Image (cartoon, rainbow, N blue to C red):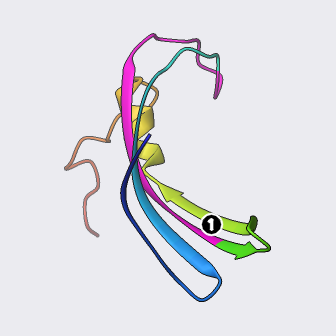
Amino acid sequence: MVVEDAFGAGDKIAVRWTATMTHSGNHLGMPATGKPVRSTGMTIARIRDKQIVEGWDNWDQAGMLKQIGAYQTPPTGLLKSA
């Protein structure tokens, strides 16, 4: 995991990160593929007494699923307007 940016104000911090990993576990009903995965995201955390007491994450889950072959973007042009 690489921290791309980090900053804070008051009792909150924000971090923009990039993670690189290998799909090696049987998750989401899909056996391990061994494929490399790169994902990006942001985390906001609230700190009290030098500990994280709350946190919120937003990361590219669809991008990860595409990289391991668990999801494909639907082809365009399937829906016709009424």
Q: Which residue is mark 1?
A: 56
Residue under the point 42% across and 23% down: 68
Q: Position of residue 66 (x, y in %)?
A: 37, 33
Magenta-colored stretch includes residue 35: yes
Q: Position of residue 82 (x, y in %)?
A: 29, 70
**Residue furthest left in the image:** 77
Q: Which residues are magenta?
A: 27-45
Q: Position of residue 73 (x, y in %)?
A: 32, 41
Q: Secondary structure at mark 1?
A: strand
Residue toward you, 67 or 79: 67
Residue under the point 74% across and 68% down: 50
Residue toward you, 15 or 73: 15
Residue under the point 59% across and 12% down: 31
Residue under the point 47% across and 11% down: 33
Residue toward you, 56 or 50: 50
Task: Say what amino acid the circle numbered 1 marks.
Answer: Trp
Magenta-colored stretch includes residue 73: no
**Residue furthest front in the image:** 50
